[in-house]
Amino acid sequence: MSSLIHTMNMGTPTIHRRSSVAGQLLAAVGLVAGLALSSSPHASAQWPGALLAGAAGLYIWYSHRRVNRVLQHTLQTERLWQAVATGCEVGIVMLRPRRDQLGRFLGYEIAEANERAHSLFSPDVEKLAGQLLIDVLPSQLHTSFLHRVNAAIESGLPQVEEHAFSRPGKAQDAVRWLHHQIVPIDGCVALVMRDTTEAHRTMHAAREREAFYRTLVDCLPMAVFARSTRPSSAGEYVVWNKAAAEIMQLPADKILGRKANDLLPPEISRRGDEQDLAVLRDPRIHHFPNLIYRTPNGERIVDLLKAPVYGVDGEVDHILSIARDVTEQKEAAEQLRLASRVIDETGDAVVVSDAVDRVVMVNPAFLNLTGMTPTEVIGRSAELLGMPPLRESHLPGVTQALRSGQRWSGESHQVCQDGRNLDTWLSVSTLRNDMQKVTQHIRLFSDISVLKAHQRELAEQARHDSLTGLPNRRAFGERLNQAMARARRNPQALAVLYVDLDGFKGVNDRYGHAAGDRLLAEVATRLLACVRLTDCVCRLAGDEFTVILEGAGNPGEVVRICQRIVERLCLPHEMNGDAVVVSPSIGAAVMQAGESPDALCQRADAAMYSAKHAGKACFVMSKDPVGSDAELHEPRRQGAI
């Protein structure tokens, strides 16, 4: 462009230099002639002409001198702009219309372009000057660019646009951005281009970073929001993430760019202003715990942090707030506190152990029950503390129940610090993690020692005669089975005696039931006195008694005991001042090999009836199975001991 201007004005300095010299000569001649004529006597007629010629010469000389100074300044300015155009970072291109010989428009021709235009526009073309614009312009810019050039020429006003384009054969990352200013100049066009690629890349990177951080902040589970403290936008929200929108039930597009008092309840707005003022007065991180926020979904408990954000000038220009909704956490903590209190206050003992059954927690009821202290319990094996291990051998069915996620319950025992063995009702369950691995065992047990003692007492009562205190028919059957089992394991003699009182009904009818009961109690006492401590005396019903003789060495031993019983029971009883004698009829049977309890009892019972038929006050020994002969013994006639 500069060379074009220079070319257009190349002859001007020479012409002006020649005119200046001629003017100087004309002025000099005129002055000399004037002086000569002024001294001549005939000068009056020629004087004005000479002066006029001299004045004209002076005028021409002065004018050309002035023009020369202007041209010199113009040349200096031209050189300056030429240097600027050559070295500047802006591409400059002069366009002029190209027409054929018939004057038809062929396109815009590049008249001049500086070096920067070469590098920006088309570095592959060695010389832009003389090229048609359409030949060097990237194809994707043809339509819009030519439209802008025509618009500039038609309107006479500058046109501005910005385009992204990639050069043929270049990689995708070679996309460039050019900012064009199209200026019409006397039918020509000046094109000023500026490379804005780096600015666009910087802006794009900034937008990507902003999008990244916005996404990051939106993904945070805590509410994040910020307010401006700049004078022009003080109090306006500039950040409001999704968690904040969820907690406050207020979307970001409703609050960004607005102030708290525009949308939030007055108490929340006022409290926020006070908190921000506190941060401004003391620029550090401030903690505001357990704040109550009333939202359309109810009250929320929030833990809030506020911190100053400094601008490039070192002044606080924003206040950042990070709020964590701790409502569920507080509710869970309250539930845990309540559960802990319930566990502490319950009367049942609670023991929590880990996956390998080491105790991690016990409640006061367990300590009170066992007499142990926390230091003696925590970290120790539950089994070593006297609790039953979670094995089938100790708790039948516990393994299957716990594996299926069910609770096992049943009776168990707990050994106390002082050695006591408590009867307990135990419930065992397990806790599992997300991987279904057992993390804790929970034992809950109650002391049922009193209940078990009462049950045993009732069981004893159910197996004993309330009148005599002797084992009853049910207990007799159990004890006979046990005794016969022992006799089989350790071969030894065992005999069963069936004792029936003779004449008891008459006594009961004559003296009354109370007297009859006293007589039965006395008979029980006498029977116990006749047998050994290892023998068992039972009352079946009414006046029927049985005796189990364990370890009777031989039949003679059985005979001696039977004789003693007959003798003692035949002694008189005092009844309302009367001496009443009630004799026994006894049937005895010694257990045979392979004999069942029922068969043994049948033989003893049959022998007893044989004794009654034999005259009473005697006993009969059954030697063989039922139906065989029996041996009759009459103590009185034989001189019983």
Image (cartoon, rainbow, N blue to C red):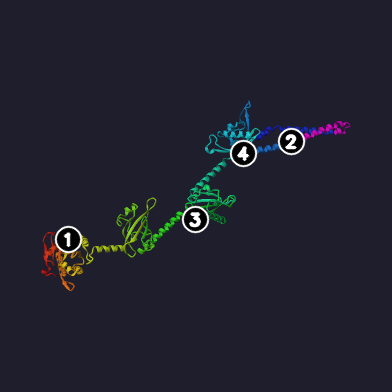
The dot on residue 90 is: 4
Residues marked 4 and 3 touching at CB (< 8 Å): no
Mark 3 or mark 1: which is in front? 3
In which quadrant of the rendered image does the C terminus lie? bottom left
* Sequence-earlier tag: 4 or 3: 4
Cα–Cα gap, marks 4 and 1: 130 Å
The Cα–Cα distance between marks 3 and 1, rounded to whole angstroms, is 85 Å
Inspect the image, locate mark 1, and give the three-letter code of the amino acid beneath it: Cys
Instruction: Give the Cα separation between the discs numbered 2 and 1.
Output: 162 Å
The magenta span reads 35-61
Viewer-side label of 4, 3: 3
Q: Earlier in the sequence, mark 3 or mark 1?
A: 3
Numbered disc in front, either 4 or 1 = 1
* Marks 4 and 1, the one that precedes in the sequence: 4
Q: Earlier in the sequence, mark 2 or mark 1?
A: 2
Nearest the eye: 18 or 131: 131
Where is mark 2, residue-wise?
Answer: 67
Q: Amino acid at mark 2?
A: Val
Q: What mark, if any, has residue 601 been given in the picture?
A: 1
Which amino acid lies under the numbered mark 3 shown in the image of this protein?
Answer: Ile
Q: Gap in Å between the C-alphas at discs 4 and 2?
A: 33 Å
Magenta segment main secondary structure: helix
Q: Which numbered circle lies on residue 292?
A: 3
Q: Is residue 403 left or right of residue 586?
A: right
- Residue 165 position by quadrant: top right
Does residue 589 appear in the picture of this structure? yes
What's the distance in space between the residues labelled 4 and 3, CA to CA? 60 Å
Label 2 secondary element: helix
**Dot placed on the residue nearer the N-terminal end, 4 or 2:** 2
Tell me the CA gap for discs 2 and 3: 86 Å
Farthest top residue in view: 102
Q: Is residue 114 left or right of residue 637?
A: right
